[in-house]
Image (cartoon, rainbow, N blue to C red):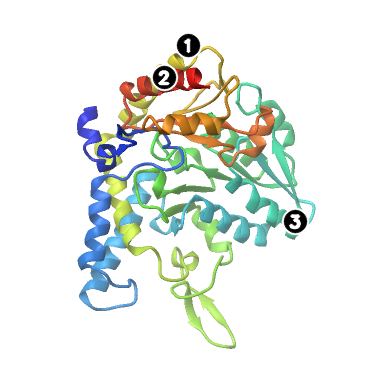
Amino acid sequence: MNINEVRSHFPQLNVKVHEKPLIYLDNGASTLKCKSVIDNINTHYSSEVSNIHRGVHFFSESGTMKYEQTRKTAQKFINANFEEEIIFTKGTTDSINLVANSFCELFLNEGDEILLSTLEHHSNIVPWQIMAEKKGAKVTEIPILESGDIDLDTYKKLLNPKVKIIGLTFISNGIGTVNPIKKMIELAHSNNSKVLIDAAQAIAHTKVDVQDLDCDFLAFSGHKMYGPTGTGILYGKKDLLNQMPPYQGGGDMIDKVSFEQTTFNDLPHKFEAGTPHIAGFIALNEAFKFIESIGIEQIEAYENELLQYAQSELLKIEGLKLFGNPKHRSGVLSFEIDGAHPQDIGTLLDRQGIAVRTGHHCNQPLMSFYNVSGTTRASITLYNTKEDIDALITGLKKVKEFL
């Protein structure tokens, strides 16, 4: 992979922070945007604006075609069976809320269980808690080991006829654990339980094939894969989506409306009420194409090499503790330094032009497991380099000296 050519697609990398070259290691929160995505959004708002699905004039029809092309691209990207299994949402959080509300409304009964792991982002905890309370069900935690791996033995014991659905992250945004989700889905299905996969941290870093995984639902966000904020994809198996009631009401999701009765549109539009983020979804197609132009296998191999280097160098710093040592880790490194508050570390790194994330990372149960209130997190993606890692190491040594 020609790293200089890859980096040339990201204009923000040319920006200086505090008169220092930008070292962007906050990719777990959001990735930088590639130029083709930016250009596409500018073009739409400059010369192609129109609402979609409803007009017969040139711009409406052209916008509809481009918007729906992204759905076709997304279907191919994750290998979904049907185009209508791709639902456009605002992001991973919106997708999970959709499933939690619509699936649980139909399938969750009093006394039933929802299983969630300690690794989950709050977005894959809170919506389920709300629905469990509403329906008289309960949320049960799938524990992890000290390494940060799922405790598979306990997971197997937790499976019982009352478990209706399991929410599981593909890759932990807190410590980078890559979960054995295919095995966990097989075990869930043998128990007649459904599974939703949070693929927000996985979609730009490893191959995601919903037919191979056989997951029932899968959610991810455009802004974690070099695309626009406010865009997300929910995949759901067609038969399940057809059974589930709409999540929101409004334009586009209806068939016929009267004050006596309303009937609903076919998939995917049944779950897409109102005017969407048209420019965003048109531009999201460019993000998919960018990843495909490099190749997800090549991206994964490069990022893994960078991760191993970063992990090795971080562990050489005296007083630094790296959280988790999972069997498989993707490009997230979460750590603490003796005597230093994460916010102070992040602030002092920022003065050196280095962007990292500090705090609990919307992972408070995981932070509680490791008995910390927060960590410093460096997260890697395809435009990062060994020089970026070296700058981080140098920066952390300066932080230690200062503190």
Residue drawn at (73%, 60%) of the image: 134
Tag shown at residue 316 = 1
257 displayed left or right of 88 = right
Could you tell me which secondary element the residue under label 3 belongs to?
A: helix
Q: x%, y% of residue 201?
A: 47, 38
Number of residue marks = 3
Residue toward you, 259 or 360: 360
Q: Mark 3: few, some, or many residues within 10 Å (few <14, many ≥20)?
A: few
- Residue 207 visible to an observer of this rendering: yes
The dot on residue 53 is none
**Label 3 vs 2, first from the N-terminus:** 3
Residue type at mark 3 is Glu
Q: Residue 3 appears in which quarter of the rendering?
A: top left
Q: Which residue is mark 2?
A: 393
Q: Is residue 139 above or below residue 100?
A: above
Q: CA distance from mark 2 to mark 1?
A: 9 Å
Q: Are marks 3 and 2 in contact (CB under 8 Å)?
A: no
Q: Locate residue 175: give its quadrant.
A: top right
The quarter holding residue 366 reads top right
The residue positioned 47% from the left and 51% from the top of the image is 235
Q: Dot 2 lies on which element?
A: helix
Residue 308 point in image, percent of width and height: 42, 18
Q: Residues within 10 Å of mark 2 (few under 14, many from 20)?
A: some
Disc 1 crowd rating (10 Å Cα; few below 14, some 14-19, many 20+) is few
Instruction: Give the residue pinned by disc 3.
Output: 133
Q: Amino acid at mark 1?
A: Lys
- The answer to whether marks 2 and 1 mark residues whose Cβ atoms lie closer than 8 Å is yes
Callout 1: SS: loop
In this rendering, the answer to whether 393 lies above or below 140 is: above
Residue at (58, 56) in percent of width and height: 97
Considering only order in the chain, which callout, 1 or 2, is on the residue closer to the N terminus?
1
Residue 356 position in % (x across, y down): 45, 33
